[in-house]
Image (cartoon, grey):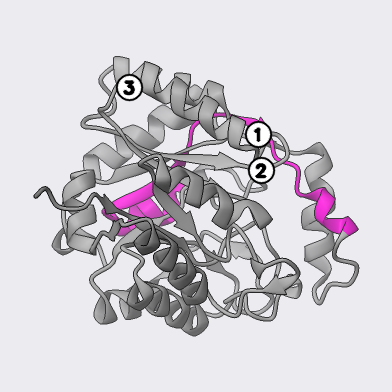
Amino acid sequence: MAGKRKTIITCAVTGAIHTPSMSPHLPVSADDIAEAAIGAAQAGAAILHLHARHPEDGRPSQEPEHFLPFLQKIKAATDAVINITTGGSPHMSVADRMRPALHFKPELASLNMGSMNFGLFPMLDRFKSFQHEWERKHLENSRNLIFRNTYEDIEAILRSGAENGTRFEFECYDIGHLYNLAHFMDRGLIQGPPFIQSVFGILGGIGPDPEDLMHMRRTADRLFGDHYQWSILGAGRNQISLATIGAAMGSNVRVGLEDSLWIGPGILAPSNAEQVARMRTILEALNLEVATPDEARSMLQLKGGSQIGF
């Protein structure tokens, strides 16, 4: 009898979208990020997608010095695949966004596959008070924000990653991003099956309806055949439902407080680990096996944890 299909759980531990005032459970300090990531790995996440924060007020940071303390602790405590962002914050320059991945040479890094409007400002209708002055401005300024990811930017990140042996989680927020990915594959700048993270529910990208998920899947199948690894990221309240639909169709899944603060309707998730555990329960109920970190490395053709720069 053939074994069950393995499903990779990625946990996005803390990111640039949500601000510290939105949830008391969002990890901000290096110690909190390390603890949250280790808990997510213990709950079943094979991949940990990581951003850093300024320790004094929780602002998104791409300073390598803010990454190193939690990277070292996570590496010492788990064998999870470390995935460092090159997205950082949409308000940062591309050069700043690339700094930690260039410095630490991780097995995996995220890469946004196109420029887009990136609307965070609707959150202001749901959250009225903030602890830090930068938080409201961070959301309000997205009314006039273009998240820059030009062809030149993407090519530079791809080439630098190739030099370091880093592979990518290709974050595709809309159908055109899949065609951009195909363009770079046709040019030979991407080797091996791509790891496509389909992102649903961000204002400026594709919507969160099941029909949108199906459209993404059909397009990816047409462009890449069966030579890709697919994963689902549903923003906000769409996190668990879209991941479940995707998993039933053969996708990997991504959860975590970067993408959603919630564990149920109106209920804040107390931890990343609880979201991972909820997703693992669903996968096992679907008769799917959760991939270990080493199984994820094999599936994604990663260089191995001994080859990173931290």
Q: Is residue 118 magenta?
A: yes
Name the kind of residue labelled 3 in the image: Phe
Front residue (pair 22, 75): 22
| Residue 259 image point, x, y percent | 59, 57
The mark tally for this picture is 3
Residue on which the image places disc 2: 201
Residue 16 as seen in the image, left or right of residue 225:
right
- Callout 3 crowding tier (Cα within 10 Å): few <14, some 14–19, many ≥20: some
Q: Is residue 259 above or below residue 300?
A: below
**Residue at which label 3 appears:** 224
**Magenta segment boundaries in residue numbering:** 98-125
Location of residue 157 in the rendering, given as x and y in whole percent from the top left corner: 39, 37
**Structural distance between the alpha carbons of marks 3 and 1:** 21 Å
Depth check, front residue: 3 or 225 = 3
Label 2 crowd (10 A; few <14 / some 14-19 / many >=20):
many
Whether residue 9 appears in this view of the structure is yes
The label on residue 205 is 1
User: SS class of the residue under badge 2?
Assistant: loop
Query: Nearer the N terminus, badge 2 or badge 3?
Result: 2
As helix, strand or loop, the secondary structure at mark 1 comes to loop
Whether tag 3 and tag 1 are in contact, CB under 8 A, the answer is: no
Based on the displayed image, in which of its 4 quarters is residue 148 positioned?
top right
